[in-house]
Amino acid sequence: MTNPEQWVLIAHLVRPQGRNGELLAEILTDFAERFAERRNLVLLHPDDKTPPRPVILEEHWLHKGRVVLKFAGIDSISDAETLRGLDVAIPRAQRAPLEDDAIYIDDLIGCHIIDVSGGTTRDLGPIISVDRDITSTPLLVLQSSTRKEELLIPFAKAWLRKVDIESKRIEMSLPEGLLAINEPFSSEEK
């Protein structure tokens, strides 16, 4: 069994790309340029029961906002297909150093957003992912603690009050009406 705390996910293998074992992957890091420095990577199975699989990165290239990865020993579409859905990781100790008050996206996952606006504190739920594709400000995707739908909260520095990654707690003072945007339409609005 793998210990998820020891790994940092840097890509997610989506599908084969090409005839020689290349794989198209979603980039899960802000440091895509570091693929050029990396050769030894690890593949993790989402079930967390399969042991990590070490791989050697032979080459890579960026392709339409994603990355194409070619691993040693993966030389056909069939070989690549066996890796579909796996995550590409590095040891946590090998993460790129950050500047000042920057935060790794991976560290945000699982943190609870606590809204401290209006003199009250409300736990809005845990962050389940971060969407960086829609706007210039990343959107925190929360599993709402009160609704079935996910909540989208802009990760705006102006709203941050306290970030405690170790306690998995982020306090934000959200503007009035922001959470109403996430509410489902009323019967009159439909």
Image (tube, rainbow, N blue to C red):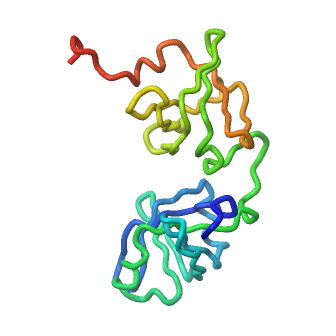
**21 vs 53, nearest the viewer:** 53
For residue 159, side relative to residue 69 (left or right): right
x, y percentage for residue 163?
72, 34
Q: Work out whether residue 124 can be spotted.
A: yes
Query: How many numbered marks does the figure carry?
Result: 0
- Which quarter of the figure has residue 65? bottom left
The percent coordinates of residue 126 (x first, y second) are: 55, 37
Image coordinates of residue 48 in percent, x first then y, are 54, 66
Quadrant in the picture for residue 29: bottom right
Q: Residue at x 75, y 50 (%)?
A: 98
Where is 146 relative to 117, above or below?
Answer: below
Q: Is residue 125 above or below residue 174?
A: below
Location of residue 97 with respect to 68 vertically, above or below: above
For the N terminus, give its image quadrant: bottom right
Towards the viewer: 17 or 152: 152
Q: Measuring from the top left, give residue 114's x and y in whole percent.
A: 62, 26
**Furthest residue in direction right, as rendered:** 100
* Residue at left offset 41%, top offset 60%: 64
Q: What residue do we see at 72% from left, 39% from top?
A: 167
34 left or right, relative to 22:
right
Q: Vertical placement of 25 versus 184: above or below?
A: below
